[in-house]
Image: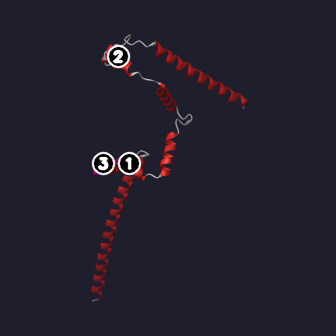
Amino acid sequence: MAEAVAGSSKVDKMAEFKTRLAKLHTKRSEAAALNHKEVVEEDRVKHMPKNHQKKRERLEAEYEEEKRKDAILAEGKDYDRVRMLEVGADEAERYERKKKKKNPDTGFSTYEDATIRQYNRLLKNKKVDLEEYEKEKVAVGEAAFYGQDNTIAIGLHKDSKEAIDNMVDDLEKQLSINILKFIFHIVNVYSL
């Protein structure tokens, strides 16, 4: 009888061991699957652009603002007025001061930025005569004016004396500025 009890306790212990082993095995496979998911997610995030999260937050905020705007317009209210009622006076004043700061000199950062600043500055000083623009478009034809494929536009356009003078004045101004910059640079280098 003692052998039967000992045998049954061995069988019970073995069955208990196998169930614990099966539980541990399922926990291990669950942990491996979870770890794999986390590794895949981490790799996905790693390969995203650095500004992805901020861009996503900005786009979500814009989307929410657009939904809010549609809701306000559906009520028949003026969206800009409602939005301005929510802005405090100090915040509005700070925004106006920031807006009034025109053309702050950011200094040299890249040649691309310097070129863009120069282009914007030159464009700001340019005055466009729309009547002259339309006359020229009619005179040379749209195909030549916009330079489509297989269009030879050489000799069709004649610059006015005023346009040539403006270009010369602008180039002389740029040259004088560059000469002054060069002189200041030389003075600074040799004064050290």
3 vs 1, front mark: 1
User: SS class of the residue under badge 3?
Assistant: helix
For the residues labelled 2 and 1, the Cα–Cα distance comes to 43 Å
- Percent across and percent down for residue 177 are 59, 24
**Quadrant for the N terminus in the image:** bottom left
| Magenta segment boundaries in residue numbering | 75-79
Drawn side of residue 62 relative to residue 100, left or right: left
Q: Please, which residue is most extreme toward the top here?
A: 155
2 vs 1, front mark: 1
User: SS class of the residue under badge 2?
Assistant: helix
Task: Choose the circle earlier in sequence order: 2 or 1.
Answer: 1
Question: What label sits on residue 135 in the rendered view?
Answer: 2
Q: Nearer the viewer, residue 92 or 176?
A: 92
- Percent across and percent down for residue 109 are 54, 35
Q: Which residue is mark 3?
A: 73
User: Picture quarter containing residue 32?
Assistant: bottom left
Drawn side of residue 104 relative to residue 65, left or right: right
- Percent across and percent down for residue 39 are 38, 54
Q: Nearer the viewer, residue 191 or 176?
A: 176
> Three-letter amino acid code at disc 2?
Lys
